[in-house]
Amino acid sequence: MTTHRASAPVRGTQLLVVHMGAVMRRPGLTLIELGWRWLVGIPILLVLWQQALKIVVEYPLESSGAGSIDFTNPWLAAQQVAGAWSYYIPHLMVVTRWLLPVWAVAWIVVSAVGRNLLLMRIEPRLRFRPATMIAMQAAWMAMFLLVVYGWFRSMEWVAATHMSGSNVGPGGEPDLVGFSIWTIFLSLGFFTLWALVNWTVTVAPLIAMLEERSALSALGQSLRLGKPFTSKLVEINLVMGIAKIALAVVAMVFSAAPLPFSDELGPGAMHVVVAASLVFFLVANDYFQVVRIRAFVEFWKIFRGSESAGQRVG
């Protein structure tokens, strides 16, 4: 493998076009990413659907008021939704307590094998090291759950202060404007935070594989890559985050485009359009995940490849 140190400024974002083309020419890379993600995601979704049906059968929508929400009145609907959420959350937590650990373990193991195979396709010299990759993916999952927990608690605070309590509007009505502003602001904030910090646990598996390090050593080294390398990783991560938001917007536009013709098309066709939009988003998102990983590998070659090769020879 030919590696070199960066002797001129490396334009991270501009090189993404090159990486996108390279991944597009090798569809097998995206298929590997799709395969392991759907292998975990589809069974979990089926279990979630089954558990949701069981809860609704045992606790019908009418008992929570969810079946009679008046969406023509936003203020009344907000209170009704809050009441239904409060009614169902204890039952949802019962399922979450056992399903979340099962999902996390399944995701860690399957993603470790899938990402290992993906890296071996990108760099054929790499070995199959599932134990190391499982440790790496467990670190990723821990950081992900921590960020999600922070977002969830912030949403609880927004709901408590704007849907009830001292900050409600005149006449005891919920402050929907304030609630919406804070929800958007905090959701984008946590999304950006995740894009800013998750590169450490994303590049660590690559370092473990490419430099033949242990999981702990790779995690430590991911924090000491130097400013030039780190800045490119953060740049690529932020661009990928923007791309994910753009994909979500495009998918929503696609799913909403036929709405003016819903009477002629019928509900069946509308469901097909929504499903197709969701599949488009998932496939495109996995494609960009592969692009990011390939970009990280190429940056490793530029900033650390020759150094690591020299250490192994020495």
Image (cartoon, rainbow, N blue to C red):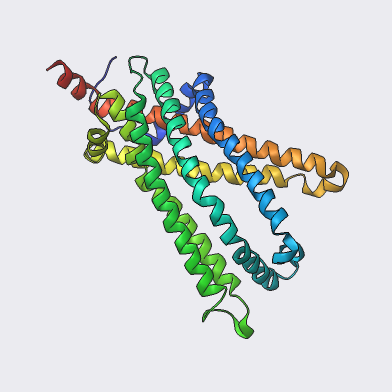
Farthest residue, direction left: 314
In-image side of 190 versus 38 (left or right): left
Residue for point 32% across, 29% down:
132
Viewer-proximal residue among 79 and 60: 60
Quadrant where the C terminus sits is top left
Viewer-proximal residue among 109 and 121: 109
Q: Provide residue 15's location: percent of width, then percent of height.
A: 40, 30
Compared to 291, does 120 lie above or below?
above
Farthest residue, direction front: 58
Viewer-proximal residue among 244 and 160: 160
Q: Is residue 253 visible?
A: yes
Residue for point 50% across, 74% down:
161
In-image side of 203 versus 34 (left or right): left
Q: Provide residue 6's location: percent of width, then percent of height.
A: 24, 28
Viewer-proximal residue among 43 and 24: 43
Residue 199 falls in which quadrant of the image? top left
Q: Provide residue 183's location: percent of width, then percent of height.
A: 52, 62
Compared to 98, does 222 lie above or below?
above
Residue for point 58% across, 32% down:
283
Compared to 7, does 99 lie above or below?
below
Q: Is residue 11 visible?
A: no
Q: Provide residue 18's location: percent of width, then percent of height.
A: 44, 25
